[in-house]
Amino acid sequence: MKKNIWIGIGITIVVALAIVLFVTQPKREPEVIKIGAILPLTGSAAPYGQNAQRGINLAISELVDKPSKYKFEVVFQDSKTEPKEAVNALRHLYDTEKIRYIIGDINSTGVLAMTPIAEKNKILLLSPGASNPDISYAGDWIFRNWHSDALEGQVAANFAFNKLGWKTTAVLYVNAAYGAGLAKTFKSVFESNGGKIVAYETYPQDATDMRTQIVKILNSKPDGLYLPGWPKEMSVALKQLKEMNSTLPILSAQGFDDPSILELAGDAAEGVIFSVPQVPDTNNSVVKKFNKKYKEKCSRLPGVCSASGYDALKIYTWAIDRVGNNPEKVRNLMANLKDFPGADGPITFDEHGDLLKPFMFKEVKNGKFTRFSK
């Protein structure tokens, strides 16, 4: 009996000591992982960069109470819608901050300028907005949860020729990788359909006067105008077209899909039709939750790149939680990503690290964006 008592006492002491050691042992702090975000927070593409930043910040705020052995922090850098600034930002994040997970850029020119550095140093780039077709072949470390202009330009050209009935078209595009990629694909596909491009004009970033190009376009008497670009400059074109009493039908691209252009262009934007990726199912729980939280936190509806910025951060944190803080393993996991539950709809990367999505069209009707219905 005494032996059993002593055994019981011994067990009690061991358990007590284990509890004391557990309680007094310092709590292990989670490993801090920094993710860089190179976005156009100023310059022509600033509305999209700011939207993406809001989406990323929302995603970070949701991770605070989520159990993880990692603590994620985002280091933002302003690319200023300039490729040189994007490169400087990447060098800073890699050389100084030692960051190998990057969200950005949204500007295609910025992404293309960064890709040689990213490939050489095995830095992951995940763009939530760059669409130039050349990005598809930029390297194994380059991804985008965004569509390629090769697809959007093709869809737009077929829509203009077959749906709108345009047989002749003028093109006026921003002289940047984004606009050039869309314009080139549109022209090629429109002509292959049997259409004719009667004017092919460009304008620089931050342009404030496009009257010379517009006169050439109006003199060519096209059935319609294809106008890919960013809100700041497209609003200039629309206002100056209206000043010249133009009634030319206008087709634009997803760059048009931001409320800021309605403020900048006013009633000059009325009637413009533009292509956008198919709207995600609003009954999808992830989409519904994102839309609700974004409006609550940001006091506005999501704009272009809001959801894709949010999803880019979520993809990185999900992948790192799953395979660890190992860029090579994260890259391999992303290369095989399929049906990731995103706020912008399910995300699957193809063999080029591209996102493929079906398209639809919207139009400006009574000063609001509505689904094209004709």
Image (cartoon, rainbow, N blue to C red):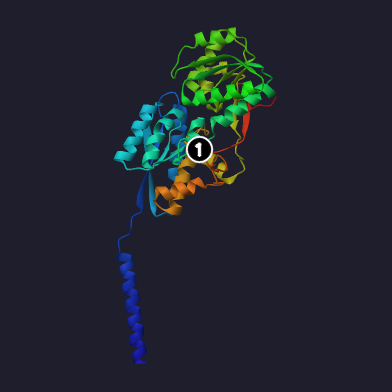
Residue 18's spot in the image, x, y percent?
33, 72
**In which image quadrant can residue 215 be found?**
top right
Q: Residue furthest bottom?
A: 1
Q: Is residue 37 visible?
A: yes
**In which image quadrant can residue 373 be found?**
top right
Which residue was labeled with disc 1? 308
Residue 23's spot in the image, x, y percent?
33, 65
Tell me: residue 175, above or below residue 148: above
Residue closest to the eye, 39 or 112: 112
The residue sitting at 39% across, 55% down in the picture is 69
The residue sitting at 66% across, 23% down in the picture is 193
Quadrant in the picture for the N terminus: bottom left
Residue 239's spot in the image, x, y percent?
53, 13
Tell me: residue 260, above or below residue 216: below
The residue sitting at 54% across, 23% down in the picture is 184
Residue closest to the eye, 347 or 341: 347
Q: In the shown orientation, is residue 33 left or right of residue 333? A: left
Task: Tell me the kind of residue under disc 1.
Answer: Ser
Tell me: residue 121, above or below residue 359: below
Residue closest to the eye, 216 or 30: 216
Crowding around mark 1 (Cα neighbors within 10 Å: few <14, some 14 to 19, many 20+) is: many
